[in-house]
Image (tube, helix red, strand yellow):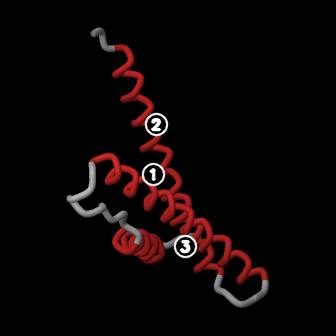
Amino acid sequence: MTTNAFAAGAYAAIQNIGAKGAPKLAPASQTAGSNFTSLLSSTLESVGEAGRRADGQAMAVAGGKANVVDVVTAVAESETALQTLVAVRDRVISAYEEIMRMQI
């Protein structure tokens, strides 16, 4: 059974990932397209890294080298990152469809 302290700790851990794994924009001297490309690339890499951390924690607990709480936290972080990525993807697709419906 989860407690309020556990939930608060998981939330804090997710917030820390956002600070560490936040996408960095390219310098302003580059074109706007490369800024978006670097933002997208770094975001995808941070989601992938969260998944790799969750996998690593799961393997560590299977080997008896990690705490189950660490695995649950890593999986929650990975799930949150993936859900955020899917939500952004859905919004981009929705915006594209809206643009395609516009009359010229």
Give the class, few, some or many, for how many residues have Cα within 10 Å of label 3's Cα (few <14, many ≥20).
many
What's the residue at 48%, 65% (across, down)? 46
What's the residue at 34%, 22% (across, down)? 99
- What whole-number distance in Å separates the C-alpha atoms at marks 1 and 2? 10 Å
As helix, strand or loop, the secondary structure at mark 3 comes to: helix
| Horizontal side, residue 74 vs residue 4: left or right | right
Q: Nearer the viewer, residue 16 or 39?
A: 39
Give the class, few, some or many, for how many residues have Cα within 10 Å of label 1's Cα (few <14, many ≥20).
few
As helix, strand or loop, the secondary structure at mark 2 comes to: helix
As helix, strand or loop, the secondary structure at mark 1 comes to: helix
Residue furthest right in the image: 63
Q: Which residue is mark 2?
A: 90
Q: Nearer the viewer, residue 82 or 28?
A: 28
| Horizontal side, residue 55 vs residue 14: left or right | right
Q: Which residue is mark 1?
A: 84
Q: Which residue is mark 3?
A: 73
What's the residue at 41%, 70% (across, down)? 21
Three-letter code for the amino acid on which mark 2 is drawn: Asp
Q: Nearer the viewer, mark 3 or mark 1?
A: 1
Three-letter code for the amino acid on which mark 3 is drawn: Thr
Three-letter code for the amino acid on which mark 1 is drawn: Thr
Q: Earlier in the sequence, mark 2 or mark 3?
A: 3
Task: Assess whether mark 1 and mark 3 are in contact (beta carbons under 8 angstroms).
Answer: no
Q: Position of residue 59 (x, y in %)?
A: 74, 78
Q: Position of residue 49 (x, y in %)?
A: 55, 69
- What whole-number distance in Å separates the C-alpha atoms at marks 3 and 1? 16 Å
Task: Assess whether mark 2 and mark 1 are in contact (beta carbons under 8 angstroms).
Answer: no
Q: Earlier in the sequence, mark 3 or mark 1?
A: 3
- What whole-number distance in Å separates the C-alpha atoms at marks 2 and 3? 26 Å
Q: Nearer the viewer, mark 2 or mark 3?
A: 2
